[in-house]
Image: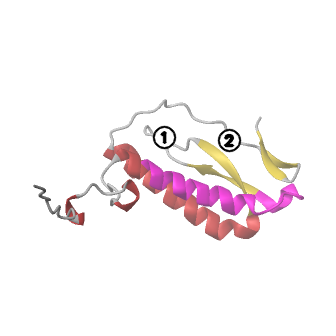
Amino acid sequence: MLTSCKTAAPDPETLPKDIAERPADSESRKYDQAQLDILKSSIDGEIASEKCTDASEWAFAPIGAKACGGPYTYIAYPKKKEESILAKLEDFKNRMIAHNKKYDLTSDCTIPAEPVSIRCESGKAVLVYP
């Protein structure tokens, strides 16, 4: 004698979610760091879209924020994109300050050397330090 069991299809709501479908944990340090990385990549991309042929058309500005204060380095940018880039640098700095406070981060308190000028090498702006 043969009997068969009818199996019910699993409820999709009870199955594990694909990691790509899970919502981001916006309260995690890893998520916050990824948001900073995205903004930094946006800044780098905007700068990289310009070729450096005349150093007088470039300027530099501090970037980021160390936990104990001050920038972590300097970055060269094309003057013709100054308004956009300086706004992004300010946003990046403020987000880093908030990130440092939120996670109670520490850093070395060394002050990075400020560049004295910019030169163009192979189409890229290079900061010149004393």
Where residue 57 appears, x then y in whole percent?
Answer: 82, 62
Quadrant where the image shows the C terminus:
top right
Give the overall secondary structure of the magenta segment. Answer: helix
Q: Is residue 35 magenta?
A: yes
Q: How is the image coloured?
A: secondary structure
Which residue is found at the position 57% from the left and 58% from the top? 89
Note whether 87 is above or below 105 in the view shown. below
Which residue is found at the position 79% from the left and 46% from the top? 126
Relative side of 102 to 32, left or right: left
Neighbourhood count class around disc 2 (C-alpha, 10 Å): few under 14, some 14–19, many 20 upward: some
Q: Is residue 62 magenta?
A: no
Note whether 84 is above or below 126 in the view shown. below
Range drawn in magenta:
33-58
Instruction: Please name the amino acid that badge 1 sits on.
Output: Lys
Where residue 117 appears, x then y in whole percent?
Answer: 79, 47
Eye-nearest disc, 1 or 2: 1
Instruction: Please name the amino acid that badge 2 sits on.
Output: Glu
Q: Earlier in the sequence, mark 1 or mark 2?
A: 1
Give the SS element for disc 2: loop
Relative side of 21 to 91, left or right: left
The label shown at residue 114 is 2
Note whether 106 is above or below 1 in the view shown. above
Per the image, the residue denoted by label 1 is: 66
Front position in the image: 63 or 27: 27
Which image quarter: residue 44?
bottom right
